[in-house]
Image (cartoon, rainbow, N blue to C red):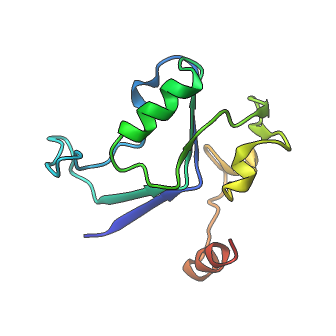
Amino acid sequence: ANTSLMERNICYDKTDPEFLFIRIPKRCDGTDYEEAKYETIRADKNLFFSEMWDVETGKKKLKAACGQGTNSRYADPLFKDLETFALSEKSPAHKMGIEQIDINRIGLLDQPYKVSRNQGKQNRSNQ
């Protein structure tokens, strides 16, 4: 089975934190979710935050969530601007290796943005 790596993401929620954490195909007890028909997901080094929870509640929920990785954190990402997802200089995302997103490269594009496998490996090895 193929494994998808999901790391260095910011998962931010303003209204309904039920789906804040990354959905892993297996429950903590090892059984499959009925609807899990996709490949294995390995998640780590992600930053989670919900405006609906205080920090202590969020940390407890992250700890209880299965499969989120030992290096993931619950903290306010300290966006300067939610329209552009610009991070402040004090954002904990920087220390986690999460890079500023270029919003011109997300969503529907006129031309696909391609990254070769070698380029992706090179980028990961530099972090």
Between 31 and 121, the one lying in front of the other is 31
Horizontal side, residue 38 vs residue 99: left or right: left
The extreme right residue here reads 89
In screen coordinates, is 31 left or right of 84?
left
Q: Using the image as rendered, state which of residue 59 and residue 79 is in the foreground.
A: 59
Q: Residue 27, located in which quarter of the rendered image?
A: top left
Q: Position of residue 64 (x, y in %)?
A: 36, 37
The residue lying toward the viewer, choosing from 70 and 42, is: 70
Is 76 left, or right, of 22 in this rendering?
right
Could you tell me residue 13's position as x and y percent? 55, 26
**Quadrant where the image shows the C terminus:** bottom right
The answer to which image quadrant residue 74 occupies is: top right
Q: What x and y, as percent, mark residue 46?
A: 55, 49
Image height of 106 relative to 3, above or below = above
**Residue 92 at what x, y percent from top left?**
71, 45
If the image is split into quadrants, where does the N terminus sit?
Answer: bottom left
Give the residue displayed 53% in from the left and 16% down from the top: 15
Q: Is residue 90 above or below residue 123?
A: above
Q: Residue at x 18, y 42 (%)?
A: 33
Q: Residue at x 76, y 50 (%)?
A: 100
Q: Is residue 61 left or right of residue 95?
A: left
Whether residue 99 is visible: no
Q: Quadrant of residue 62?
A: top left
For the point 82% across and 42% down, the residue is 90
Q: Nearer the viewer, residue 28 or 103?
A: 28
- Tally the numbered discs: 0
Q: Is residue 116 visible?
A: yes
